Image (spheres, grey):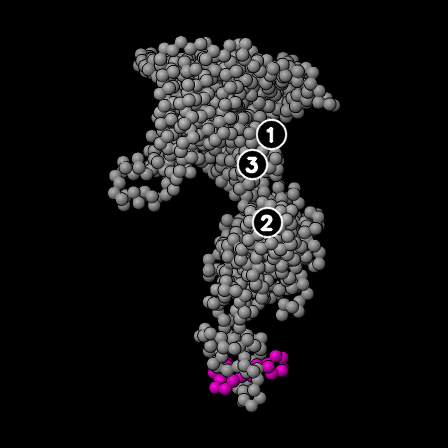
Amino acid sequence: MSLALVRPATSARPMRPGLLLWTLILAVTLALALLPLPYPKWLSEVPRAWRLGWDKDVSAFLAWLVEDASLGLFSFQELTRAISWLLGWPLEWATALFATGVMRGQGSAAVQVLPPMPWFAVVAAAAMLGWHWGGRGLAALAGLAFLYLAVFGQWASAMVTLASIAIAVPLGVAGGLLIGIAGFRSRKVAGLITPLLDLMQTVPIFAYLVPILFLFGFGPVAATLATVIYAMPPMVRITMQALHAVPQEVKEYGVMAGCTRHQLTWKVLVPAARPSLLVGVNQVIMLSLNMVIIASMIGAGGLGYDVLTSLRRLDIGGGLEAGLAIVLLAVALDRLSRATQERAPGQGQRFWILFVAVLLGLYLLGLLLPGIARYPDAWTLSTGPFFADLVGWINVHFFDTLEAIKTAIVLNLLVPVRRFLTELPWPWVVLVTVLAGWRLQGPPLALLLLGFGLFIVFNGQWQNAMLTVYLCGVSVLVAALIGIPLGILGGLSRRAWRVLEAVIDTLQTLPSFVYLIPVVMLFRVGDFTAMIAVVLYALAPAVRYTAHGIQQIRPVLIEAGTAAGCTNRQLLTRIRLPLALPEIMLGLNQTIMLALSMLVITALVGTRDLGQEVYVALTKADTGRGVIAGLCVAFIAITADRLIQAGVARLKARGAVA
Amino acid sequence: MAAARPVKLAANGIWKLFAADGAALDRLGPDPDDAALERAGLVAGVADASLAIGEGEIFVIMGLSGSGKSTLVRCLSRLIEPTRGQVLLDGQDLTRASPAELIRLRRHKMGMVFQNFALLPHLTVLGNVAFPLEVQGVARAERTRRAREMIALVGLSGREHDLPHQLSGGQQQRVGIARSLAVGPDLWFLDEPFSALDPLIRREMQNEFLRLQAGLKKTIVFITHDFDEAIRLADRIAIMRGGRIIQTGTPEELVLHPADSYVAEFTREAPRARILTARAIMRPLDERIEVAGAVDAGAKVQAIAAKVEAAPIPHLVTEGDRPVGLIDRSAVLAVLLGREMVR
């Protein structure tokens, strides 16, 4: 029935007939959802007999990989063991250096041969790096952040986390750089990598963990490996972009100077691209931190494990304390690595000699005075009880208010939207997305979206997928309602922007896990809690892109508007907003991506969507189920991304941007 | 004169098609015209360009943007592969040189200066100038010594440890020049080296360039879109349009005999007094006429104008010791006032 309605319109020209078409589609959609039509059951979820059963195939394939697969000279299992071993010993050394010291013997019989870096040496190292890269302010920030870890009893866990990062980041950076260079040199390799990167950046975090857990087992090595894999894609992308962005003349100069290919890469291109590459390094650091926290689920230990256990025990104080430690670690690492981008290269050998000398000296001091090498317990403060009391106090005094807000939103927003989306028959929804793809870009996109839709349907994930779309959609809506006005404010007022930028910069450095803690404390588990956490996490790009879109409008256009006699309000609605629209859409796109990635993590607070499916698969080590559900999330993300990108391209082509 | 010099660099029938290979060109025959190319849907960056550059000559390739001059110079240096044609450096065909051979040639025989300087942002002035030597594996002490020499040559002593972004545009290009000379190349490519500079600095750099070349005697391929610059610097000029070289000659030849109206358009406003020689405006010898003195046939009108104009009677024009013609104040005035040439 729908096809017959649609056909004449699609062949017509865009604009007016398009509007008619989408009005019709909206009407049909509303009718389908709201009228009490007696749908056959297969329209909401295909029966088991029709399903592809790919989850079993994936599980079987991975099992075969582990048990039987041979790669000629060695078996696949030997390969995974080799990787474990290769990753294992540097990790052991890093852990020894920062956290445990060098041990001899096994288990409880182990004896510490050499102690780890004393706490004051690490604090001094952080402060010295801050001083070298950014001056006094950064030195104070980095030093105080690490001091906090010691004073508030988070030292041991934080150092375990830091050790994982110290191994994961160099590997992620080096791997990303090498793959990026390969992609830069060969168009074929780039063509191969790019879709893989798209997929890797949209597959939810948990979904990485499932196969890795299966292949590499539970423990710090598997967790570090997951971290490296998760943090590498942006480095690959940034490397390719940065190398392409090196001015053509500089490349030509390298050739004319008689560089070999190797020299051209390492002496000309990579150093010339250094500032952009450092942005990539910063990304790797922040993503590694994010993942190392989440990877506590497969045995990373450290701060993430503390948060996870407190979340599970609903230990408010402990969770907040560990969460705050993560925040400080994140902010310190972020600011340190960003400061390197601003610095001119070269020079400073003298600093590094001093740096190593001071650290050696402090280490020796630690050996001589073992009493203070470990931060004395007596000096430790705990904020745990304070936070617990604070949350308790809020709950005592504001419970009714909070509960009323929660209930109102759940009943008036969440439940209706959920019902609406889950009752739509899947053929209609798939058809509408395919149609949108067709009209915005053409058959290739339509075909891709059709493939994604059918994949979800015939793997029996339709209901889960719609639940994901519902929670994500509502969260993005709320984030947009809050973020876009804030962004407009930031775009119009410099002072407001300075404040906003500081806030969203900090929000964006926080690992996603951290967002859950305060929300769970106040609203307990459920969709509402998940929504709040997702909104907080995904807010930043909506603000940033909107502000940027408004700031980048050429002043001439505003002047022209003023000269034409526009009021301030007209300037905003007639000139600024339309011109900023493509940027705002791109911000929304980012918001959706972040919302989806956070949504999966909110499975921990009891949502029931694809994220929960992945999480359950993770706890049961059911690889097939986890991979398929993870792919479904990725496909939803890619669908949204492609449709918005195509829409923005059309907006721009239509001349919305002068 | 150019003809007297041995040929250093020659290009024979260079073609460069974009997004098409040699086979596509071959199908159109040995020398397709623009109409044939357009019918075949091909875009020629360079079409059938030939030139021969003498040793120690300043050869300027002049053309407006999109004329193919940058593409041609990149074919000559083999930064890009010509679709068809030969490039001979000292008789050796560069289009057949192996990658290793090309690296060797570039390390020792070629230098190139770029429009936007192309300095390596992470290296100091010293590091940039020493870079080509470093790539060759010259020991640190030696390359530092030679780099300092080059930096002194372009007048940047004292700025050795500055980074490129700390220098002005003119200073950056001095680094670019020093760097390209560090390996002592025979062949020096300059791709619009002064176009990104302010007019006053540009003039200063042109003088600097002439001063350097007076001592260095390199073979130079100089690209520019500025006809005045071409005239100031060139021994010979090749004018390009639509990928083709439409005329090659000394500035004087271009002014006196423009190949077509396009070239004439450029030469109309040219400062003739600085281009034309006494030979170009002299009249036939007449033994009976008394002369005030002698001027050299190769001297520019500008240089002899005051002397000739001051005398009430003509001057003798001599080629070496041999008298070849007469020149009087009316001929000089005609040039200075830009009157149409009567010859």
Residue A239 marker: 3
- Mark 3 on the same chain as mark 2: no
Label 2: chain letter: B
Q: Residue at x 63, y 16 (%)?
A: A61
> Which secondary structure lies at badge 1?
helix
Label 1 vs label 2: CA separation?
43 Å
Q: Depth check: give the residue in front, A185 or B33.
A: B33
> Which secondary structure lies at badge 2?
strand
Q: Which residues are magenta?
A: B307-324
Residue A171 marker: 1
Amino acid on which disc 2 is placed: Leu
Q: Residue at x 54, y 89 (%)?
A: B289
Residue B17 marker: 2
What is the x, y in percent for residue A68? 69, 16
Q: Is residue B72 magenta?
A: no
Q: Residues within 10 Å of mark 2 (few under 14, many from 20)?
A: many
